[in-house]
């Protein structure tokens, strides 16, 4: 109780810093928003968000999950906003604004939750392990593997998320060339660039592209106009790095992984779910999340079938039937009894979703929404898109996303809603997606691979090739403005 009273006292103290004259103009309009950019609350909100984001960027060193500071920051920012608006007799204005941001988050969160559930189901059915073992058994040379993992990262990430894709390809690299640190570094850089570039031309490839599509800034099919620029973004640094890859051929492995029963049908159901989401959005005018949740129902029904099949096969096995196949079941590892099998459970796949990422996304949406409500995003939009021009501003967004996560950057742009052509919206979608490749900390894929590669892929190892990646970044922008000039 004492802590609650202390927090309330702190909020009142901050509110007392408000120069009421600065709010008078906004309050005069009754239900209009108050301009608080030059007030104590506004400045405090900026400081709170900055501190939270420093903690997010230091996650690798502090081991504090990134969702925690931004969730607290969101609560503090909106608590201060609510206090000020209640003081001016306008609580419903702040309430409407935060509900709007919460609805946007809920749509994106449920969409991502379904996608993550499908990815987890495919992992449990050993889809990705089977692909990895196939690559290892083929006995490719290091240069061939460099190109193969890069292209696979580019073409898998538009459907699966770039983090899962990068981890899968890195596992292949480590299994084949893990005793060659130079190869691992170059291959990991190539995978990060390929995964980020591949995610930029698909509405499902990255959270930022998903946000742009759900906001109806760009139609579903229009994203694929970014295919050629994204391919250039991947190819330019890959070609230049190719000559530094060791020309060796390690021995092949005889590892064989078979997919579990129903794996291919789950992949098909995922594709059907994507088609359903696109159809709901394009032809019925409904939010894509309704189609995705319908697709979750597909998986639930198929999970019921897998359960029945599992029970039937286990009964046959107990009866001594030699051709019984319990591969529809999954290994039970939660109790430590590896080798025991249990029926397929779709809710266990939901539970294994990246909840830290989903909650981080909540904190970012609410924080950036709060800063926009305070008036800072209108101020930033005036400077960037009015003074600099849309092209320069969108290029700067990509550079900024190499340092700051692209999710808050893109959400800020969408909240600003600058008046731009379709070509410019495609440009900022691409730059926000591929700009993070310039630094290893600029994307989730890069951060994850630094941890997975056992110290062979590092920040400074990536930084050495940043000029080459920046050249690909510039080339992709030039190609986009050339081949899609009619959209500007």
Image (cartoon, helix red, strand yellow):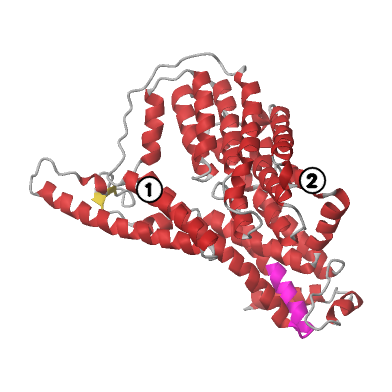
On the image, numbered disc 1 is attached to which residue? 268
The answer to whether one can see residue 281 in this image is yes
Q: Is residue 104 above or below residue 24?
A: above
Mark 1, Cα crowd under 10 Å, few <14 / some 14-19 / many 20+, is few
Residue 142 coordinates in the image, percent (x, y): 50, 19
Q: Which mark is residue 391?
A: 2
Instruction: Report if residue 88 lies within the magenta region.
Output: yes
Instruction: Report if residue 358 lies within the magenta region.
Output: no
Residue lying farthest to the right in this orientation: 21
Residue 487 coordinates in the image, percent (x, y): 72, 47
Secondary structure under tag 2 reads helix
At 66% from the left and 68% from the top, the residue drawn is: 75
Q: Nearer the viewer, residue 347 or 226?
A: 226
Residue 131 coordinates in the image, percent (x, y): 39, 34
Q: Is residue 471 above or below residue 326?
A: above
At 58% from the left and 26% from the top, the residue drawn is: 185
Among the 4 quarters of the image, the one containing residue 74? bottom right
Side of 270 where 286 appears, left or right = right
For the stretch drawn in magenta, the main secondary structure is helix
Q: CA distance from mark 2 to mark 1?
A: 39 Å
| Nearer-N-terminus badge (2/1) | 1
What is the number of callouts on the image?
Answer: 2
Side of 235 where 48 appears, left or right = right
**Which range is magenta?**
76-90
Side of 321 where 363 appears, left or right = right
Q: Nearer the viewer, residue 20 or 477?
A: 477
Side of 305 where 168 appears, left or right = right
Split into 4 quadrants, where in the image is the N terminus? bottom right
Among the 4 quarters of the image, the one containing residue 226? top right
The answer to whether one can see residue 200 in this image is no
Residue 67 coordinates in the image, percent (x, y): 59, 57
Mark 2, Cα crowd under 10 Å, few <14 / some 14-19 / many 20+, is many
């Amino acid at each position: 109780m004492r802590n609650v009273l202390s927090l309330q006292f702190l909020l009142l103290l901050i509110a007392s810093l408000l120069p009421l004259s600065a709010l008078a103009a906004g309050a005069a309009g009754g239900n209009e928003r108050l301009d608080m950019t030059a007030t104590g609350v506004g400045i405090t909100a900026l400081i709170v968000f900055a501190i939270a984001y420093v903690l997010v960027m230091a996650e690798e060193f502090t081991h504090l999950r990134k969702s925690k500071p931004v969730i607290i920051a969101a609560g503090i920012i909106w608590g201060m906003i609510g206090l000020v608006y209640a003081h001016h007799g306008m609580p419903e204005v702040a309430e409407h604004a935060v509900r709007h941001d919460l609805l946007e988050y809920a749509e994106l969160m449920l969409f991502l939750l379904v996608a993550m559930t499908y990815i987890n189901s495919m992992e449990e059915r050993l889809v990705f392990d089977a692909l990895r073992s196939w690559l290892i058994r083929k006995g490719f040379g290091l240069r061939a593997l460099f190109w193969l993992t890069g292209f696979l990262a580019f073409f898998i990430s538009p459907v699966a998320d770039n983090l899962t894709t990068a981890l899968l390809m890195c596992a292949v690299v480590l299994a084949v060339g893990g005793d060659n640190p130079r190869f691992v570094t170059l291959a990991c850089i190539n995978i990060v660039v390929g995964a980020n570039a591949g995610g930029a031309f698909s509405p499902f490839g990255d959270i930022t592209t998903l946000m742009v599509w759900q906001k109806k800034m760009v139609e579903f099919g229009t994203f694929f106009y970014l295919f050629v620029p994204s391919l250039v973004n991947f190819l330019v640094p890959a070609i230049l790095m190719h000559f530094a890859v060791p020309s060796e051929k390690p021995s092949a492995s005889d590892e064989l992984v078979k997919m579990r029963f129903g794996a291919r049908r789950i992949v098909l159901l995922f594709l059907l779910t994507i088609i359903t989401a696109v159809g709901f959005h394009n032809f019925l005018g409904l939010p894509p999340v309704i189609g995705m949740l319908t697709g979750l129902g597909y998986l639930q029904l198929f999970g019921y079938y897998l359960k029945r099949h599992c029970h039937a096969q286990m009964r046959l096995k107990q009866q001594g039937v030699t051709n019984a196949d319990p591969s529809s079941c999954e290994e039970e590892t939660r109790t430590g009894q590896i080798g025991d099998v249990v029926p397929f459970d779709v809710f266990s796949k939901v539970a294994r979703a990246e909840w830290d990422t989903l909650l981080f996304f909540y904190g970012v949406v609410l924080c950036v929404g709060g800063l926009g409500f305070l008036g800072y995003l209108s101020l930033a939009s005036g400077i960037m898109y009015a003074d600099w021009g849309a092209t320069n501003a969108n290029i700067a967004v990509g550079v900024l996303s190499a340092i700051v996560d692209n999710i808050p950057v893109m959400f800020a742009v969408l909240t600003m809603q600058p008046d731009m052509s379709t070509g410019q919206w495609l440009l900022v979608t691409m730059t926000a997606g591929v700009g993070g490749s310039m630094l290893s900390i600029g994307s989730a894929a890069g951060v994850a691979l630094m941890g997975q590669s056992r110290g062979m892929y590092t920040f400074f190892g990536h930084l050495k090739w940043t000029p080459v990646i920046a050249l690909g970044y510039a080339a992709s922008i030039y190609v986009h403005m050339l081949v899609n000039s009619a959209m500007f």
